[in-house]
Image (cartoon, coloured by chain):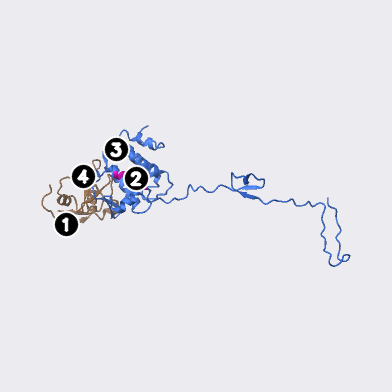
Protein backbone atom coordinates (compact mmCIF):
# COMPACT_ATOMS: atom_id res chain seq x y z
CA UNK A 1 0.00 0.00 0.00
CA UNK A 2 1.30 3.33 -0.94
CA UNK A 3 0.60 6.26 1.28
CA UNK A 4 -0.80 9.35 -0.16
CA UNK A 5 1.82 11.93 -0.58
CA UNK A 6 1.34 15.59 -0.62
CA UNK A 7 2.48 17.31 -3.70
CA UNK A 8 5.27 19.64 -3.01
CA UNK A 9 4.40 22.90 -4.61
CA UNK A 10 6.89 25.06 -6.30
CA UNK A 11 6.37 27.71 -3.67
CA UNK A 12 7.90 25.62 -1.02
CA UNK A 13 10.44 23.80 -3.06
CA UNK A 14 13.43 25.16 -4.82
CA UNK A 15 12.87 25.90 -8.53
CA UNK A 16 14.89 22.97 -9.71
CA UNK A 17 12.92 20.36 -7.81
CA UNK A 18 10.50 18.47 -10.05
CA UNK A 19 6.84 18.32 -9.28
CA UNK A 20 5.91 14.97 -7.89
CA UNK A 21 2.81 13.23 -8.99
CA UNK A 22 0.29 11.89 -6.57
CA UNK A 23 -0.02 8.18 -6.26
CA UNK A 24 -3.53 7.16 -5.35
CA UNK A 25 -3.82 4.27 -2.94
CA UNK A 26 -6.73 2.64 -4.77
CA UNK A 27 -4.99 2.47 -8.11
CA UNK A 28 -3.09 -0.82 -8.42
CA UNK A 29 0.20 -0.98 -10.10
CA UNK A 30 -0.21 -2.07 -13.78
CA UNK A 31 0.76 -5.72 -14.08
CA UNK A 32 3.64 -6.42 -16.36
CA UNK A 33 2.30 -7.67 -19.67
CA UNK A 34 4.90 -9.76 -21.44
CA UNK A 35 5.00 -9.53 -25.24
CA UNK A 36 3.59 -12.71 -26.87
CA UNK A 37 6.22 -14.83 -28.53
CA UNK A 38 5.09 -16.01 -31.96
CA UNK A 39 6.48 -19.39 -32.74
CA UNK A 40 5.99 -22.32 -35.12
CA UNK A 41 4.07 -25.35 -33.97
CA UNK A 42 5.79 -28.49 -32.67
CA UNK A 43 8.89 -26.61 -31.52
CA UNK A 44 10.46 -26.21 -28.11
CA UNK A 45 9.73 -22.48 -28.33
CA UNK A 46 6.03 -23.28 -28.68
CA UNK A 47 6.12 -24.89 -25.22
CA UNK A 48 7.09 -21.59 -23.55
CA UNK A 49 4.58 -19.85 -21.32
CA UNK A 50 3.94 -16.70 -23.33
CA UNK A 51 4.30 -18.39 -26.67
CA UNK A 52 1.62 -17.99 -29.34
CA UNK A 53 1.75 -20.72 -31.95
CA UNK A 54 1.43 -19.54 -35.54
CA UNK A 55 -1.18 -21.36 -37.68
CA UNK A 56 -0.02 -23.91 -40.25
CA UNK A 57 0.93 -22.66 -43.73
CA UNK A 58 -1.64 -23.13 -46.53
CA UNK A 59 -1.29 -26.56 -48.14
CA UNK A 60 -2.34 -25.24 -51.55
CA UNK A 61 -4.74 -28.09 -52.25
CA UNK A 62 -7.02 -25.83 -54.26
CA UNK A 63 -4.31 -23.80 -55.85
CA UNK A 64 -4.26 -24.17 -59.59
CA UNK A 65 -1.26 -26.20 -60.62
CA UNK A 66 0.21 -25.73 -64.07
CA UNK A 67 0.34 -29.03 -65.92
CA UNK A 68 3.65 -30.19 -67.21
CA UNK A 69 3.90 -30.65 -71.00
CA UNK A 70 2.44 -33.98 -72.02
CA UNK A 71 3.78 -36.61 -74.35
CA UNK A 72 0.57 -36.05 -76.30
CA UNK A 73 1.62 -32.45 -77.00
CA UNK A 74 5.07 -33.56 -78.10
CA UNK A 75 3.63 -36.11 -80.53
CA UNK A 76 1.14 -33.62 -81.89
CA UNK A 77 3.80 -30.98 -82.53
CA UNK A 78 5.94 -33.51 -84.30
CA UNK A 79 3.03 -34.35 -86.59
CA UNK A 80 2.84 -37.94 -85.40
CA UNK A 81 -0.92 -37.95 -85.04
CA UNK A 82 -3.07 -38.82 -88.03
CA UNK A 83 -5.37 -35.89 -87.42
CA UNK A 84 -5.95 -32.44 -88.86
CA UNK A 85 -8.00 -29.58 -87.51
CA UNK A 86 -10.89 -28.39 -89.63
CA UNK A 87 -13.11 -25.41 -89.05
CA UNK A 88 -16.75 -25.84 -89.77
CA UNK A 89 -19.69 -23.56 -89.15
CA UNK A 90 -20.25 -25.03 -85.69
CA UNK A 91 -16.69 -24.59 -84.52
CA UNK A 92 -14.03 -27.20 -84.98
CA UNK A 93 -13.97 -30.69 -86.29
CA UNK A 94 -11.31 -33.37 -86.65
CA UNK A 95 -10.42 -34.83 -90.01
CA UNK A 96 -8.63 -38.15 -89.72
CA UNK A 97 -5.78 -38.87 -92.12
CA UNK A 98 -6.14 -42.57 -91.45
CA UNK A 99 -9.36 -44.49 -90.91
CA UNK A 100 -9.99 -44.90 -87.20
CA UNK A 101 -10.73 -48.59 -87.70
CA UNK A 102 -7.19 -49.07 -88.96
CA UNK A 103 -5.43 -47.18 -86.18
CA UNK A 104 -3.24 -48.90 -83.63
CA UNK A 105 -5.41 -48.27 -80.55
CA UNK A 106 -2.77 -49.61 -78.18
CA UNK A 107 -0.53 -46.78 -79.28
CA UNK A 108 -2.93 -43.91 -79.80
CA UNK A 109 -5.72 -44.28 -77.27
CA UNK A 110 -3.56 -44.07 -74.11
CA UNK A 111 -1.73 -41.10 -75.63
CA UNK A 112 -4.96 -39.25 -76.25
CA UNK A 113 -6.13 -39.93 -72.73
CA UNK A 114 -2.88 -38.55 -71.43
CA UNK A 115 -3.62 -35.44 -73.50
CA UNK A 116 -6.73 -34.74 -71.44
CA UNK A 117 -4.39 -32.90 -69.02
CA UNK A 118 -3.88 -30.22 -71.64
CA UNK A 119 -5.83 -27.04 -71.11
CA UNK A 120 -4.90 -24.98 -74.16
CA UNK A 121 -6.22 -25.07 -77.69
CA UNK A 122 -5.81 -27.07 -79.92
CA UNK A 123 -4.35 -29.79 -77.69
CA UNK A 124 -7.31 -30.11 -75.38
CA UNK A 125 -9.72 -30.13 -78.32
CA UNK A 126 -7.84 -32.85 -80.16
CA UNK A 127 -7.49 -35.01 -77.07
CA UNK A 128 -11.16 -34.78 -76.22
CA UNK A 129 -12.57 -35.07 -79.75
CA UNK A 130 -10.05 -37.73 -80.71
CA UNK A 131 -11.05 -39.92 -77.78
CA UNK A 132 -14.69 -39.40 -78.61
CA UNK A 133 -14.18 -40.47 -82.23
CA UNK A 134 -12.04 -43.46 -81.32
CA UNK A 135 -14.49 -44.73 -78.74
CA UNK A 136 -17.44 -44.20 -81.09
CA UNK A 137 -15.84 -46.02 -84.00
CA UNK A 138 -13.31 -48.33 -82.43
CA UNK A 139 -15.64 -51.24 -81.84
CA UNK A 140 -13.83 -54.36 -80.71
CA UNK A 141 -10.47 -52.60 -80.73
CA UNK A 142 -11.29 -50.81 -77.48
CA UNK A 143 -11.54 -53.72 -75.03
CA UNK A 144 -7.94 -54.95 -75.20
CA UNK A 145 -6.72 -51.40 -74.54
CA UNK A 146 -8.78 -50.72 -71.42
CA UNK A 147 -6.09 -51.77 -68.90
CA UNK A 148 -3.72 -49.27 -70.51
CA UNK A 149 -6.29 -46.50 -70.27
CA UNK A 150 -7.16 -46.66 -66.64
CA UNK A 151 -3.84 -45.30 -65.38
CA UNK A 152 -3.89 -42.09 -67.44
CA UNK A 153 -7.53 -41.64 -66.47
CA UNK A 154 -6.67 -42.10 -62.81
CA UNK A 155 -3.83 -39.56 -63.03
CA UNK A 156 -6.13 -37.02 -64.64
CA UNK A 157 -8.94 -37.51 -62.16
CA UNK A 158 -6.77 -36.38 -59.22
CA UNK A 159 -6.56 -32.75 -60.30
CA UNK A 160 -9.01 -30.03 -59.54
CA UNK A 161 -8.69 -28.55 -62.99
CA UNK A 162 -11.57 -26.55 -64.25
CA UNK A 163 -12.37 -27.62 -67.75
CA UNK A 164 -15.21 -25.48 -69.00
CA UNK A 165 -16.14 -26.57 -72.49
CA UNK A 166 -19.11 -26.61 -74.78
CA UNK A 167 -20.45 -29.90 -73.62
CA UNK A 168 -18.56 -30.79 -70.46
CA UNK A 169 -18.52 -29.22 -67.01
CA UNK A 170 -15.18 -30.44 -65.78
CA UNK A 171 -12.57 -33.10 -66.26
CA UNK A 172 -14.12 -35.24 -63.53
CA UNK A 173 -17.40 -35.50 -65.44
CA UNK A 174 -15.58 -36.27 -68.69
CA UNK A 175 -13.61 -39.02 -67.02
CA UNK A 176 -16.72 -40.52 -65.47
CA UNK A 177 -18.46 -40.53 -68.85
CA UNK A 178 -15.43 -42.05 -70.50
CA UNK A 179 -15.24 -44.87 -68.00
CA UNK A 180 -18.92 -45.55 -68.55
CA UNK A 181 -18.40 -45.74 -72.30
CA UNK A 182 -15.51 -48.11 -71.76
CA UNK A 183 -17.67 -50.29 -69.56
CA UNK A 184 -20.53 -50.34 -72.06
CA UNK A 185 -18.39 -51.04 -75.09
CA UNK A 186 -15.59 -53.04 -73.54
CA UNK A 187 -17.36 -56.36 -73.08
CA UNK A 188 -17.79 -58.61 -70.07
CA UNK A 189 -14.41 -58.01 -68.46
CA UNK A 190 -14.46 -54.27 -68.83
CA UNK A 191 -15.94 -53.46 -65.45
CA UNK A 192 -13.56 -55.64 -63.45
CA UNK A 193 -10.56 -54.12 -65.25
CA UNK A 194 -11.74 -50.61 -64.55
CA UNK A 195 -12.64 -51.36 -60.94
CA UNK A 196 -9.22 -52.85 -60.30
CA UNK A 197 -7.48 -49.62 -61.26
CA UNK A 198 -10.14 -47.13 -60.15
CA UNK A 199 -11.71 -48.65 -57.03
CA UNK A 200 -14.11 -45.76 -56.57
CA UNK A 201 -15.76 -46.40 -59.93
CA UNK A 202 -19.31 -47.78 -59.74
CA UNK A 203 -20.86 -49.74 -62.58
CA UNK A 204 -23.39 -48.01 -64.78
CA UNK A 205 -24.74 -51.36 -66.01
CA UNK A 206 -24.89 -53.79 -63.11
CA UNK A 207 -27.59 -53.47 -60.44
CA UNK B 1 -20.86 -48.42 -109.14
CA UNK B 2 -21.62 -44.82 -110.04
CA UNK B 3 -22.40 -44.03 -113.65
CA UNK B 4 -20.60 -41.42 -115.71
CA UNK B 5 -20.58 -37.87 -114.38
CA UNK B 6 -24.02 -36.50 -113.75
CA UNK B 7 -24.28 -32.74 -113.45
CA UNK B 8 -27.13 -31.12 -111.55
CA UNK B 9 -29.62 -29.02 -113.48
CA UNK B 10 -30.85 -26.82 -110.65
CA UNK B 11 -30.07 -25.88 -107.11
CA UNK B 12 -32.22 -24.72 -104.21
CA UNK B 13 -31.75 -24.15 -100.51
CA UNK B 14 -33.32 -26.28 -97.80
CA UNK B 15 -36.03 -24.67 -95.73
CA UNK B 16 -36.79 -27.29 -93.16
CA UNK B 17 -34.78 -30.08 -91.57
CA UNK B 18 -35.40 -33.66 -92.51
CA UNK B 19 -33.36 -36.85 -92.58
CA UNK B 20 -32.54 -36.23 -96.22
CA UNK B 21 -31.33 -32.73 -95.37
CA UNK B 22 -29.25 -34.15 -92.52
CA UNK B 23 -27.41 -36.45 -94.90
CA UNK B 24 -27.00 -33.71 -97.50
CA UNK B 25 -25.51 -31.54 -94.77
CA UNK B 26 -22.99 -34.26 -93.99
CA UNK B 27 -21.95 -34.70 -97.61
CA UNK B 28 -21.57 -30.96 -98.03
CA UNK B 29 -19.50 -30.74 -94.85
CA UNK B 30 -17.12 -33.20 -96.47
CA UNK B 31 -16.94 -31.10 -99.64
CA UNK B 32 -19.38 -32.91 -101.93
CA UNK B 33 -22.66 -31.79 -103.45
CA UNK B 34 -24.49 -34.93 -102.39
CA UNK B 35 -24.34 -38.73 -102.36
CA UNK B 36 -24.31 -38.88 -106.17
CA UNK B 37 -21.12 -36.86 -106.44
CA UNK B 38 -19.53 -38.78 -103.58
CA UNK B 39 -20.09 -42.09 -105.29
CA UNK B 40 -18.82 -40.68 -108.60
CA UNK B 41 -15.63 -39.27 -107.10
CA UNK B 42 -14.82 -42.11 -104.74
CA UNK B 43 -16.00 -44.81 -107.10
CA UNK B 44 -17.93 -46.61 -104.39
CA UNK B 45 -21.41 -48.08 -104.43
CA UNK B 46 -22.12 -47.90 -100.70
CA UNK B 47 -21.73 -45.18 -98.11
CA UNK B 48 -20.97 -45.95 -94.47
CA UNK B 49 -24.12 -45.25 -92.43
CA UNK B 50 -25.25 -45.61 -88.84
CA UNK B 51 -27.54 -48.65 -88.74
CA UNK B 52 -29.71 -47.12 -86.00
CA UNK B 53 -30.52 -43.84 -87.73
CA UNK B 54 -29.43 -44.29 -91.34
CA UNK B 55 -27.36 -41.10 -91.19
CA UNK B 56 -24.00 -40.97 -92.92
CA UNK B 57 -21.32 -42.22 -90.58
CA UNK B 58 -18.05 -41.77 -92.39
CA UNK B 59 -16.92 -40.04 -95.56
CA UNK B 60 -13.57 -39.71 -97.23
CA UNK B 61 -12.86 -36.21 -98.39
CA UNK B 62 -11.20 -35.20 -101.64
CA UNK B 63 -7.90 -34.79 -99.79
CA UNK B 64 -8.34 -38.41 -98.60
CA UNK B 65 -8.81 -37.49 -94.93
CA UNK B 66 -11.80 -39.00 -93.15
CA UNK B 67 -14.72 -37.25 -91.55
CA UNK B 68 -16.70 -39.08 -88.91
CA UNK B 69 -20.22 -38.08 -88.04
CA UNK B 70 -22.38 -38.65 -84.98
CA UNK B 71 -25.17 -41.15 -84.78
CA UNK B 72 -27.61 -38.38 -83.88
CA UNK B 73 -28.55 -35.25 -85.75
CA UNK B 74 -25.72 -32.79 -86.37
CA UNK B 75 -27.41 -30.21 -88.59
CA UNK B 76 -28.91 -27.54 -86.34
CA UNK B 77 -31.96 -25.59 -87.46
CA UNK B 78 -29.84 -22.53 -88.01
CA UNK B 79 -27.63 -24.47 -90.43
CA UNK B 80 -30.54 -25.87 -92.48
CA UNK B 81 -30.82 -22.88 -94.83
CA UNK B 82 -27.18 -23.36 -95.88
CA UNK B 83 -27.85 -26.88 -97.15
CA UNK B 84 -28.13 -26.99 -100.94
CA UNK B 85 -30.47 -29.36 -102.72
CA UNK B 86 -29.37 -30.34 -106.23
CA UNK B 87 -31.87 -31.51 -108.82
CA UNK B 88 -30.76 -33.62 -111.77
Identify by letter the chain in brown.
B
Q: Residues within 10 Å of mark 3 (few under 14, many from 20)?
A: some
Please, which residue is most extreme toward the front here? Answer: A44
Q: Residues within 10 Å of mark 4 (few under 14, many from 20)?
A: few
Q: Secondary structure at mark 1?
A: strand
Q: Is residue A108 magenta?
A: yes
Q: Position of residue A133 (x, y in %)?
A: 29, 46
The residue tagged 3 is A144
**Disc 3 chain ID:** A
- Residue A87 falls in which quadrant of the image? bottom left
Q: Secondary structure at mark 2?
A: helix
Q: Secondary structure at mark 4?
A: strand
The residue tagged 1 is B10
Query: CA–CA distance between discs 3 and 1?
Result: 51 Å
Establish whether labels 4 and 1 are both on one chain. Answer: yes
Establish whether labels 3 and 2 are both on one chain. Answer: yes
Query: CA–CA distance between discs 4 and 1?
Result: 27 Å
* Residue A77 visible in the displayed image: yes
Please, which residue is most extreme toward the bottom here? Answer: A15
Q: Are marks 3 and 2 in contact (CB under 8 Å)?
A: no
Q: Residues within 10 Å of mark 1 (few under 14, many from 20)?
A: few
Query: CA–CA distance between discs 4 and 3?
Result: 25 Å
Which circle, 4 or 1, is nearer the viewer?
A: 4
Marks 3 and 2, the one that precedes in the sequence? 2
Query: CA–CA distance between discs 3 and 2?
Result: 15 Å
The residue tagged 4 is B48
Query: CA–CA distance between discs 2 and 1?
Result: 47 Å
* Residue A91 visible in the displayed image: no
The residue range painted magenta reads A107-116
Residue B27, placed above or below residue A196: below
Amino acid sequence: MVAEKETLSLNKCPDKMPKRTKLLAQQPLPAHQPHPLVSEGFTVKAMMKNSVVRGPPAAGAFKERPTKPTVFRKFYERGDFPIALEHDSKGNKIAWKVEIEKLDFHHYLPLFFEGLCEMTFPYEFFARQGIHDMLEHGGSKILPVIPQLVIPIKINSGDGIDYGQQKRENIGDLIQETLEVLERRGGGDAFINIKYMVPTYESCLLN
Amino acid sequence: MASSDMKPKSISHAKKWSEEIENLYRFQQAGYRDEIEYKQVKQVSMVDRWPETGYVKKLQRKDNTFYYYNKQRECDDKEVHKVKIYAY
